Image (tube, helix red, strand yellow):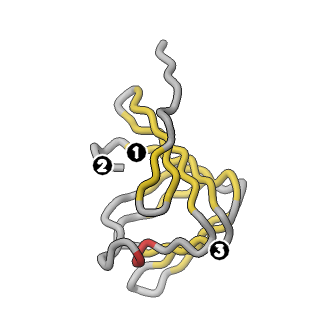
Amino acid sequence: MRTTALADAVLVAGVRKEAARIGGATITRATYPTGWRHADHDPAPCALEHVGYCLSGRLRVWWPDGEEVLVEAGQAFALPPGHDAECLDECTLIQFDRSEES
């Protein structure tokens, strides 16, 4: 069995991220400020799938086909690629990623 601590926080596109790579996956605690929106940092839809758990806040996520979901504190989520997102409140998410990008 292995354990590890999250790395010191870094600020990436206005998001506070603490991450650890373990067991072939990256575990990230990401804190997004109120009003943060993916499109403000990248005009293309997000190309990554996100799987995780919302610790606090609310995140509105939508896709070009009109599908929309609201992720709230206490909910697990799986968000396919091609989305945009906006934080309605400061949001802290725990995300699990098996790709090399996260």
- Give the SS element for disc 1: strand
Residue 59 numbered tag: none
CB atoms of marks 3 and 1 within 8 Å: no
| 8 over 16 or under it: above or below | above
**Residue 99 falls in image quadrant:** top left
Q: Which circle, 2 or 1, is nearer the viewer?
A: 2
> Is 69 in front, or is 15?
15
**Residue 83 falls in image quadrant:** bottom left
Task: Decide if residue 53 is on the left or right side of residue 66.
Answer: right
Looking at the image, which residue is at 56% across and 57% down? 77
Q: Which residue is mark 1?
A: 97
Residues under labels 2 and 1: Cα distance?
Answer: 8 Å
Residue lying at the far top of the rendered structure: 1
Q: Which residue is mark 3?
A: 88
Q: Amino acid at mark 2?
A: Glu
- Give the SS element for disc 2: loop
Q: Amino acid at mark 1?
A: Asp
Q: Position of residue 51 (x, y in %)?
A: 48, 52
For label 3, the crowd category at 10 Å Cα-Cα, with few meaning under 14, some 14 to 19 and many 20 or more, is: some
Q: Position of residue 68 (x, y in %)?
A: 53, 79
CB atoms of marks 2 and 1 within 8 Å: yes
Looking at the image, which residue is at 31% across and 65% down? 47
Q: Which circle, 3 or 1, is nearer the viewer?
A: 3
| 2 over 48 or under it: above or below | above
For label 2, the crowd category at 10 Å Cα-Cα, with few meaning under 14, some 14 to 19 and many 20 or more, is: few
